[in-house]
Image: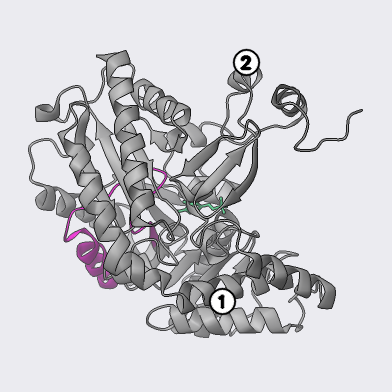
Amino acid sequence: MNKITNHLPTAELQAIDAAHHMHPFTADGELKQKGARVITSAKGIWLKDSEGEQVLDAMAGLWCVNIGYGRDELADVAARQMRELPYYNTFFQTTHVPAIALAQKLAELAPGDLNHVFYANGGSDANDTNIRMVRTYWAEKGQPEREVIISRWNAYHGSTIGGTSLGGMKGMHGQGSLPIPGIEFIDQPNWYAEGGDTDPEAFGLERAQQLEAKIKEIGPEKVAAFIGEPVQGAGGVIVAPDGYWAEIQRICRKYDILLIVDEVITGFGRTGNWFGSQTLDIKPDIMTVAKGLSSGYVPIGASIVSDKVADVLAATEFNHGYTYSGHPVACAVALENLRILQEEGIVDRVREDTAPYLAEKWHSLADHPFVGETKIVGMMASLALTPDKSKRAPFAADTGTVGYITRERCFANNLIMRHVGDRMIISPPLVITRAEIDTLIERARKSLDEAYEIVK
Ligand code: PLP
């Protein structure tokens, strides 16, 4: 058997990959037929593949490499921590310095009274923690019947049983008989696709008020929490109309329902503030974080919990935790990542300089014959592709195909842009420069032009 290294021919790597590696969210037939692109190294916002191509990663991996690739400081911290204390757990009244220091830092950065950190390995299992945590909270308060969590169709909250159940992706629910009991859904605030003739703000209010109707239908005494992403990411970078979040919060307060804000994408500078909750004026009781917490260099996630919830949980033993909750290497790397984000002023630069610059360039794509809507918050943005701008019409029966064709043109032009149906989305590393934004936009326009020629 050949030793697998970067020096093997691409086709050989692809064949072995297709034979033995089961990929997430990838059709097996496609993998076998075309082979996967083999990424060999990365620096800043640039990936290098096994054919030597330089690829602009406008998705920051999976929305996570906030500080960009190739920061030696994180590698050095990981190596140091592995030598000193590679592993110890935080169960049964033990702790260690990296877990303590990161919890303190997160309490300092997170808004309001979000002062307590429960560690996980990523976003999905942090949301699993949240399901158990809010149900335990209500049980401790003498209201164990409060079990239902309300979420939104087309939300994404992960891929575990709990995360998939909280998410509103019907294609995912269909595999594995999900959701689990006690999860209910309201419609998403996607004005472009679902708003009809209603003006955006009225539509947003209508969608938020579905929460009140749903609470009444279930019975407020049975509802534990509402969960939402500040900006729906994997659903297509859907930005709720103004007023939506204020109304959601009014309703949560009225019925004393906990608010879980899933900041797995929107955390750590993505929206131009440390958290999307600050950008959108949301006051969560629990916040889910992952991805940008370590800029994806190592797996780590967390639930950041308010005093209100933590005080109640403190009365019992929460029988929950993962072997790697608060893993010392992951915590040390995350802490170093936060230091870089803070000391290099990366979040401020996004808010004050590069995000406004990207916004101006992104909106300039609206003149393309294919583009019906351009949306952007900080460093996450979407384009809605349409055959008829005046009607905000979707592409008929082949919805998703045009997005797929556009994504493939981007791929061919060495730009990683993702598609969700016929929405094109980006979420570049926060360190992207103005010159790199120009390159991103040039390649996006070229790819749109090429897709247009194929489809029109
Ligand atoms: N929540 C949100 C909002 C996400 O976007 C994701 C991943 O994309 C998750 C949760 C799941 O996180 P992970 O893949 O780290 O389990």
User: Residue shown at 47%/59% (left/top)?
Assistant: 264
Res 122 quadrant in image: bottom right
Nearer the N terminus, badge 2 or badge 1?
2
Is residue 232 visible to the viewer in this orientation of the structure? no
- Give the amino acid at mark 2: Gln
- Give the amino acid at mark 1: Val
Residue 138 position in % (x across, y down): 48, 72
Q: Quadrant of the C terminus?
A: top left
User: Residue shown at 52%/58% (left/top)?
Assistant: 68
Is the residue marked 1 within 8 Å of ligand 1, measured from its CB? no
Residue 412 position in % (x across, y down): 46, 26
Q: Secondary structure at mark 1?
A: strand
Residue carrying label 1: 117
Residue carrying label 2: 33
Q: Is residue 254 left or right of residue 308?
A: left
Residue 124 position in % (x across, y down): 56, 54
Q: Is residue 37 magenta?
A: no
> As rendered, which of 189 and 110 lies closer to the eye?
110
Residue 299 position in % (x across, y down): 64, 59
Q: Secondary structure at mark 2?
A: helix
User: Residue shown at 39%/61% (left/top)?
Assistant: 270
Res 3 quadrant in image: top right
Residue 279 badge: none
Query: Which stretch did the figure color magenta?
Result: 226-255
Q: Is residue 76 left or right of residue 387?
A: right
